[in-house]
């Protein structure tokens, strides 16, 4: 869950820091007060793209930072390790993101620099948004299939299946490429073989190329190196420092005998003399390694010229040249028995596909069983949300083999008695779709491992008793998740375990937005609920607000 959230210079907000807890948190405020700022902050941390216009006017950048408790969920560290990012320290995930008005923004995860894609991958683990567009997602076949598979617990089976599906497609692609590959003429094949032999004549490992370049540089400038090494030998050896140093050491010994405080200086001078002698010896060894062998120099020149040719044609580096060599090797290998290779690849693909069809049958059996259970649970939940006579069925039909199996899934819905069951997108209004989505999400919450759920006006188009029931279901979700809900319904707001109020203040020069917790201040919360009921100054509204809060206990 999110433990702390800090927002700075986002939209109309100057800066805010919130301490958050588990359970169901409601967010309220007048229309246009800026409730979307909180959702925008969470959206930034989830890795969603953002325009530079979100930076508050007059500021250079906006930033959002959050501390999340992972409760020992190993998935977070597994993903972080796969992304080469720091793992969570004491189960704490720290996310930071800034958007600059003119320059590129910055992202860090647990102190390590990260990319937007990495933030998105992590966001899929910890947060799920349900907004006004969410019911439209429910109309899509892929969303319905995902919901059914989540209820059926098919994540592991689907991972195995999809790996096989990718292998089957890769084999078929290779077969198609082999079958359509252009045949080489005898002259073309001979030319490619000569190029491959030439590439094979030189060791193209990174270590070998580095040594070649170093040895060639030393060989080609051997005379210059010898002269410079001679200068060092003279300066450090018997004609230079080697002649002077013994005298200096003796003088230092004499000084140390007279003044004990000079002992450390004498020791340092001794160490300097030893180091100077080691340096002289090492330079001497370097000089002895210079080859004056014309034959060796010519061999080095030949290898270097060959490497420069390879780099010019196929470079810029050794890896690119090695890739070209392997491409030539594959191209020549493909000139063998093409028909036999194509047949082998297709046979392997057929074998994989046969196994996939068996897996698809297992998936279908699990989906069919889960469909009845999910539909029954959703129907029960819909009854509590005001659909007393509604019906919901989940149809699992045989389809062509695909990346998710061989099933076509459809959610069929009937809001009233005496009507036919039809696909959800053909019958549900926006209010109905929102409640169907909430019912399904509530049922799936038991198996959904996403810790943070965000609902943006999911209670739109409902009111009265139904609104109160929506609030109760959201509060129930809060028992296993950290739930945030932006709402205009006082019946929902009263049921929040925590209550944040968004207020907007304006003067002639500026407009600012603030977020304040009121759940610890009974009078302030009653006042906010009374405002939502129509008039915070009304005794009737205040009395009703008190009743809502008392009833929520």
Image: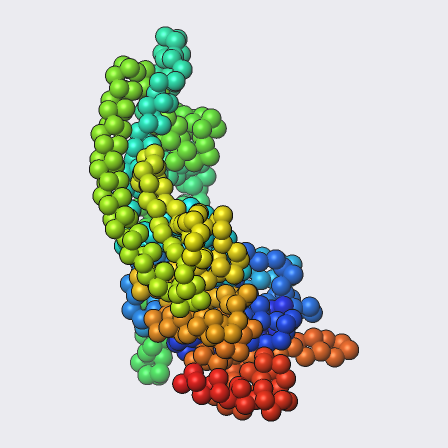
Q: Is residue 111 visible?
A: no
Q: Residue at x 55, y 65 (%)?
A: 461
In the image, residue 20 above or below residue 418: below
Residue at figure coordinates x 37%, y 23% from the top left: 177
Residue 401 placement: quadrant: top left
Residue placed farthest to the right in the image?
Answer: 508
Q: Within the image, what quadrant is residue 277 found in?
A: bottom left
Query: In the image, is 542 to the left or to the right of 223?
Result: right
Can residue 182 be seen from the camera position used here? yes
Answer with left or right where residue 62 lies relative to residue 88. right
Marker count (numbered): 0
**Corner quadrant of residue 408:** top left
Q: Position of residue 26 (x, y in %)?
A: 49, 75
Give 27 or 534, whichever is nearer the viewer: 534
Q: Is residue 519 left or right of residue 393?
A: right
Relative vertical location of residue 258 with respect to residue 285 in this rendering, above or below: below
User: Looking at the rendering, in which quadrant would you find the C terminus?
Assistant: bottom left
Q: Position of residue 386 (x, y in %)?
A: 44, 67
Please indicate whether residue 425 sits to the left or right of residue 533 in the image: left
Between 273 and 84, the one lying in front of the other is 84
Q: Position of residue 377 (x, y in %)?
A: 32, 61
Q: Is residue 175 above or below residue 396?
A: above
Q: Nearer the viewer, residue 209 or 89?
A: 89
Q: Residue at x 53, y 57 (%)?
A: 430
Q: Where residue 469 appears, x then y in whole percent?
A: 44, 72
């Amino acid at each position: 869950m999110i433990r702390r959230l800090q927002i700075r210079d986002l939209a109309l907000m100057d800066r805010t820091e919130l301490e958050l807890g588990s359970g169901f948190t409601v967010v309220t405020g007048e229309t246009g007060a800026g409730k979307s700022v909180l959702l925008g902050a969470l959206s930034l941390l989830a890795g969603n793209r953002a325009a530079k216009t979100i930076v508050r006017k007059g500021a250079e950048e906006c930033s959002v930072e959050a501390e999340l408790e992972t409760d020992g969920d190993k998935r977070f560290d597994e993903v972080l390790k796969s992304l080469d990012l720091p793992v969570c320290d004491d189960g704490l995930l720290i996310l930071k993101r800034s958007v600059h008005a003119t320059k590129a923004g910055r992202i860090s995860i647990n102190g390590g620099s990260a990319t937007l894609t990495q933030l998105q991958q992590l966001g899929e683990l910890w947060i799920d948004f349900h907004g006004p567009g969410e019911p439209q997602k429910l109309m899509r076949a892929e969303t319905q299939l995902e919901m059914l598979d989540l209820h059926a617990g098919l994540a592991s089976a689907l991972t195995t299946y999809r790996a096989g599906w990718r292998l089957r497609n890769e084999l078929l692609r290779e077969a198609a490429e082999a079958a359509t590959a252009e045949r080489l003429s005898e002259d073309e094949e001979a030319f490619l073989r000569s190029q491959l032999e030439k590439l094979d004549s030189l060791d193209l490992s990174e270590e070998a190329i580095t040594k070649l370049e170093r040895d060639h540089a030393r060989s080609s400038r051997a005379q210059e190196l010898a002269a410079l090494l001679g200068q060092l030998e003279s300066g450090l050896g018997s004609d230079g420092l080697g002649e002077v140093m013994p005298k200096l050491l003796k003088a230092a010994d004499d000084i140390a005998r007279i003044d004990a405080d000079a002992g450390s200086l004498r020791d340092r001078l001794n160490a300097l003399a030893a180091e100077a002698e080691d340096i002289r010896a090492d330079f001497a060894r370097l000089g002895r390694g210079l080859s004056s062998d014309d034959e060796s120099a010519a061999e080095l020149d030949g290898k270097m010229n060959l490497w420069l040719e390879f780099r010019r044609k196929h470079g810029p580096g050794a890896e690119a040249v090695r890739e070209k060599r392997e491409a030539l090797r594959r191209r020549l290998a493909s000139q063998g028995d093409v028909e036999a290779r194509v047949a082998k690849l297709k046979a392997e693909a057929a074998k994989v596909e046969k196994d996939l069809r068996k897996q698809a049958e297992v998936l279908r059996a699990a989906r069919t069983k889960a469909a009845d259970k999910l539909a029954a649970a959703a129907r029960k939940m819909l009854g509590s949300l005001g659909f007393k006579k509604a019906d919901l069925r989940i149809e699992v039909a045989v389809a062509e083999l695909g990346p998710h199996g061989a099933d076509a899934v459809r959610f069929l819905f009937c809001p009233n008695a005496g009507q036919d069951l039809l696909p959800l997108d053909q019958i549900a209004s926006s209010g109905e779709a929102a409640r169907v989505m909430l019912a399904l999400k509530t049922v799936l919450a038991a198996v959904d491992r996403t810790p943070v759920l965000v609902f943006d006006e999911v209670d739109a188009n409902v009111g009265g008793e139904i609104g109160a029931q929506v609030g109760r279901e959201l509060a129930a979700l809060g028992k296993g998740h950290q739930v945030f809900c932006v709402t205009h319904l006082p019946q929902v707001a009263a049921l929040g375990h925590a209550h944040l109020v968004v207020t907007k203040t304006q003067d002639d020069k500026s407009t600012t937005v603030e977020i304040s917790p009121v759940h610890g201040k009974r009078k302030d919360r009653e006042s906010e609920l009374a405002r939502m009921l129509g008039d915070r100054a009304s005794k009737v509204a205040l009395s009703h607000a008190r009743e809502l809060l008392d009833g929520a206990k």
